Amino acid sequence: MLLGVVAGLVAFAALLPLMTGSIARTMVDNRVRDLGALGRTVEARAGSGTATTPVSEIAPVLGPEWDGIAGPPVGQYRVQAAGTIPGSMQTLTLLGREGFCDHLRVTAGRCATSRFEVMISGASARASRLTVGDSTVVIQMSGATEPVRRTLRVVGVFEPSAGDDFWRGIDVGAVRIARDVAGEPVQLHTWLTPAATFSGAVPQVRGRSEGLPPPLDRDSPASVGWSEIETSVARQLTPAAFTYDKLDQARAAVARSQALAAQSSTPVDITEQVTTIDQAVRGDVEQVQVIAPLLLAQLVLLQVVLVWVVLRALLTQRRTEVALVRLRSPGARGARRLVLGELLPPVLIGLPVGLLLAYALQTVSRLTWLPGPAVWSWTALLVAVAATAVCVLLLLLLVRGLVRTPISALLRTVPPRQRRWSLSAVETVLLTLAAGMLVAVATGNLTGAPVLVTPLVIALAVGLLVGGLLVPLGNRVAGRLLDRGRLPSLLALTGLARRPSTRQLILALTAAGALLAFGASTLVLGQANRAAATSAQTGAPVRLLAIDASATVDPQNLVRVVDQVDRQRQHLAPVFRVRSGSSDGPVALLGEPGPMTRIASKVNGIDPWARLGDASSGNASAGGAGLPAVVASWSAPATEGGFTAPSLRQADTEYVVAAQVPLVPGGEANTFVTPLAPQLRTADRRDLTAEIWSDGTDPALEQRATAALRRAGYSGVTVERASTTQRRLDESASAYGLQLGLVVAAGSVAVAVLVLVAVLSSQAAGRRRDRAALERAGVSRAVLGRAGRLETALTVAPLLLGGAVGWLGARLAAPSIPWFTQPPPFPVAQETPPVLPAVLAVGAGLVVVAVVALVAGRGKESA
């Protein structure tokens, strides 16, 4: 028993730094993964100038300091030119990336290896009507140098390897459509060519060439290269290698690369996300290092109470032995040696056993919750040693008190009857601290992560009060029960009140119930708040953001697309977002109120589209002075009356506040919603954001809408999913930290069971004597059975009391708990935890503890 209890304390104490480190490593892994291939790229780029910069000149900028955390350096040349294929306008990007032949699938011909040979994708071949063996002319026009004309020969057709990070998340096989200033479509192609294609002298600067400029009806001389060649060298961070432990190396590598870039004779720009990751992870770790210790420290403190209870129980069983040894020649010193020789070895062995248990728990968490390998931590070893030292200190203090107890008191099996309750110095301090924390949290003077320890402190204080009042109040109640002849209740109550270990049992079970309810309440409330934040940020389960790079697409096209694929608006709805010229100006969100009420997300029951109501016709409550608008009270362009804001027309429009809601799902600062129909007929604005909001139930419909948007003239479509935002919030530092409440809840049940077993073990001999005496006095076994069951119920009842304290603590602490790593600017977090999770958690714990109490009680009495 003692070995297991000490090992548990050591394990949960060592788990503090282990879990903090695991969460920090997981945060790095998650952030590197979310960057994508392009974000993981560290690039040194020399801008296009009057001379071509060779790759070898800038390669040292990303030198060996990146080894071990990033892949090998890859050089690249890039230049743009115009195609001359009849029937369409083309902008060609000639890309010469080292080793590109190893990262594509050749579907026709071969890989380009010589100067002026190119490979084109299958989509580019179809769009340009080129095939292997064809030649095509490209022209590079530059405002600074003479034009360049080149004939390129197509030697191969390719398809890029799917999911290959070599292409940095860019689809080099796609043909995109853009529009020029006149609104005409322009095809954007990417052709692959070897580095030799980029050789040659830079064309003459305009106005400085001798004679006439070269005619564009024949190729430029072979000695002439290209103008404005972009040279770059890139290394990609390796997700499996770039870990939390390598942040120091990455930080030093960035500093070294920036220093080398500054010293270079050619201007070199460094593009990297390592600094962003480093800063973000630092914030994550700081938050976890506050939340995790405060949550797990409560369990560790409860474990300390358990060790104290178990040591007291074991020493209580040896009171007679200690008295006999003290009566003999060794005296107090011999008694001390006897007890320490028996109890000290299990305490010391608990150190390695507990440490192994901590690493086993860390391994389980890394396999099921926080992916990644378990790693050694010297901090965990130091914490484990400190926890063992606390156990040794408790043992020495209790043994010291035992050997100094008068022999007459040691030989007494039943303590003197206690008529009044007195507080010790420690109990007085704890009660004062609990009262002060309760007042501070209720008044808002105590905020932040420290409020997480409030439930345990209050629960310990309540446990002390109940345990202290049990004896004097129990004596009074016992007299009334005796007068009324309720023998089972009398035996159960007096059995608890007369045993000295009852106070420790009430204290531990109350604290365990509080941790159980608090962990369950904060866990469920945290999930609900993150779900609400997701809905508030995204606005809908899925959003299709139509990209109009040239700002030439008619807004009517978006509505036509939705009419084409979902005319009844069962799953899709068109939305326009129009921003002001200033960053803090009003933002109009235009949609169809009926479909948006069905499709848009609701946050805590908030539906701004439903509030538009009959105002969708354009007649607001202020006598039709403007278009109706529903504003968000947390950041509103106006709280009442009228205001001027952007619209689908070039000129701003007058709006009237029809209603206020706490927030607009999918909105930002100064966002308001207004009906789309009144403005669509006269829409002439192009600098707006076109979106399609979907309820996410029909992915095929979303794919058809995406294809239709491209046909309607939009150059691209970005898909944003609420599930992605939800996943990122669930993988944030605050979420991981609060999810440790599961560990605390499970540990609190284990502590409650161990405390119960320890107390029942210490009471076993007394219970057998009491039962035998009662049977000899003529008390029936049926009465004794009912008394035993009632005593078991009274024994585990403090768990229910602790559950109520835990839920109340969660309610008081909710406004100050860090629900988010980066709190949203709008009010979204709920502050009242649901009751059901706490009831279910405490109920499950109560069943476990009651079963253990019944089994252990019967086993000890029959032994």
Image: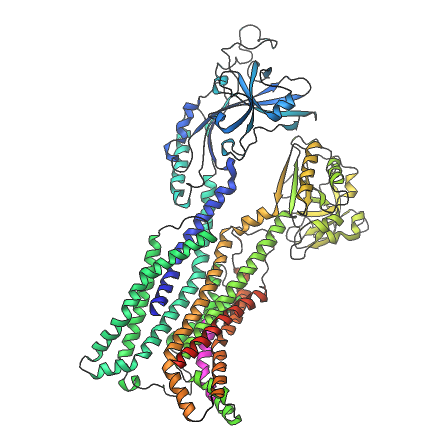
Please provide percent x and percent y for residue 721. Answer: 61, 45
Magenta stretch encompasses residue 391: no
Q: Residue at x 44, y 70 (%)?
A: 752
Please provide percent x and percent y for residue 397. Answer: 30, 73
Can residue 443 be seen in this snapshot?
no
Quadrant of the image containing the N terminus: bottom left
Please provide percent x and percent y for residue 666. Answer: 65, 47
Q: Is residue 557 above or below residue 543?
A: above
Q: Quadrant of residue 343?
A: bottom left
Q: Residue at x 54, y 67 (%)?
A: 807
Left or right, 524 with reference to 637: left
Please provide percent x and percent y for residue 453. Answer: 46, 64
Magenta stretch encompasses residue 462: yes
- Which range of residues does the magenta coloring cover? 460-477
Left or right, 217 with reference to 7: right
Front-most of 695 and 267? 695
Quadrant of the image containing the C terminus: bottom left
